[in-house]
Each structure stands twice: as C-alpha cells, then as structure tokens.
Image (spheres, grey):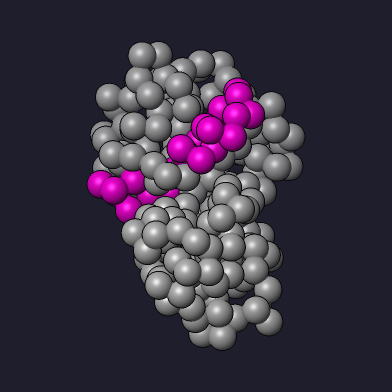
Amino acid sequence: MVKIIILDDHELFGHGVAKIIEAEDDLSVLKVFTDPNLLTHYIKTLQPNIVLCDIKIKDVNGLNIVKTYSKKYPNVKFIMLSGYNLEEYKIKAYENGAVGFILKDESTDKLVDGIRAVYYFNQNLKHDMVLAKPLLSDQEKEILRMIAKDMKNQEISEALFISKRTVEYHITKLIRKLGVESRLGAVIKGIKLGIIEESETKI
C-alpha cells in the first residue's frame, strides 16, 4: 500500500484529490491538510511514502518546502501539484528535490499513474511505469549522451566549445534533475527514460 499525505492551500481541492486516490486499491491517503507547519508532525507520525505538495501554499513557497524536507526525509518522495503549466516551475521543482510534477487539471488516470510511477520507480522495482522525462535542456541531453560514450569532462568541453567548469556545472545539474548520485546512475536513468539509447553507451 502506497501511503500518501496531501498538503494543499485549498482544502476542498485536497479532499477531491484524496477521493480520487482512495478509489484505487493500492493507494491510501492518510491526511489532507493546509498548514505547512504541520508537515514535520505528519511525516513523523504517519510515515508517508509520498507527499503531494501544492507549489504555492498561502504565503509559503512550496518549492522551498520540498527543498528542505526532501533532504531532511530522503525516504519520502515529493510530488508537486500546480495549476500552472510553466516550464520554469517544472525545472525548479526537480532542482529542489521533487520527483514528480502533476498539473491540477490533469486527468484522473495521469494522477494515479504518476503517483505509482514515483513510488515504484524510486523503490527500484522492475515496473513498466516510470517518471515523465525530467526537463533536461538540449545541452544537458547532449552532455548525457557524451557521458554515456565514456567521454571525460575535458573531452566534452572541447567538443561543445565550452569551459570544463561549465561542463561540470551541467553534469551536476542533470544528475540532480534525474534524481541519481553519479554519472553512471545518470546514464542508466537516461536509458530507462528514453533520453538516450542503450546502443549509444560505451560505459
């Protein structure tokens, strides 16, 4: 059973989402609440697998909440909820530690499939569902392909006509976006998400 809590500025919306989720046999909503100050309490007492968090909660930035709590509770996965389909929000969500981004007007199927994808993928289970592709820039994708070909930072720098330091910055950024801890992990995740082909790799 996947245990979920929902932190959303609009209580009625939060309960509406909970009703949709509760209709699924393998998903359970333990709590719906609007006060971000209660998040620590509910994480400790309810021990959820996933937190659905509104990107804007009253006067609090949901991205800052995720940034703080995803580090403090690494076993809890955060999915951002947003009414705005803005690429900037998606990028910032992944950069701050979120592992998913779901629009509030998304279909019921996409909502529950997204929750399952985040849970099962991050449990390292063999599962057909995976996260939607994280928003890597074209240059980050190109660098990831070069990493897959076992190219060193200096070689990537020379191939793309950018500084070695810029290459290192992009690698750090794409590793964070993909939710992994190493270059190899980034390549493996890239293959699973269809960003790169396994035939391209030389690692």
17 or 59, which is in the foreground?
59
Measured as percent of width and height from the top left, residue 84 is found at 60, 24
Foreground of the two, 133 or 6: 133
Whether residue 87 is in magenta: the answer is yes
> Measured from the top left, where is residue 58 in percent x and y?
40, 14
Hey, which quadrant is residue 18 in on the image? top right
x 69%, y 26%: residue:
105
Q: Is residue 189 left or right of residue 111?
A: left
Query: Residue pushed farthest bottom?
Result: 202
Q: Position of residue 151 (x, y in %)?
A: 48, 78
Asked whether residue 152 is in view, the answer is yes
Horizontally, residue 36 falls left or right of residue 20, namely: left
Residue at image location 57% in from the left, 50% down from the top: 137
Front residue of this view, candidates 32 and 120:
120
Q: Would you place residue 151 above or below residue 123 in this image?
A: below
Who's the residue at 47% across and 27% down the image?
Answer: 55
Q: Is residue 156 above or below residue 46?
A: below
Tally the numbered discs.
0
Please state if 17 lies on the left or on the right of 91 as rendered: right
Pick the front one: 167 or 107: 167
Membership of 203 in magenta stretch: no
Q: Position of residue 69 (x, y in %)?
A: 30, 41
Which quadrant holds residue 184? bottom left
- Looking at the image, is 152 positioned above or below residue 95? below
| Residue occupying image coordinates x 53% and y 63% | 160
* Vertical order, 130 against 148 (above or below): above
Q: Which residues are magenta?
A: 70-93
Name the image quarter holding residue 162: bottom left
Q: Is residue 25 visible?
A: no
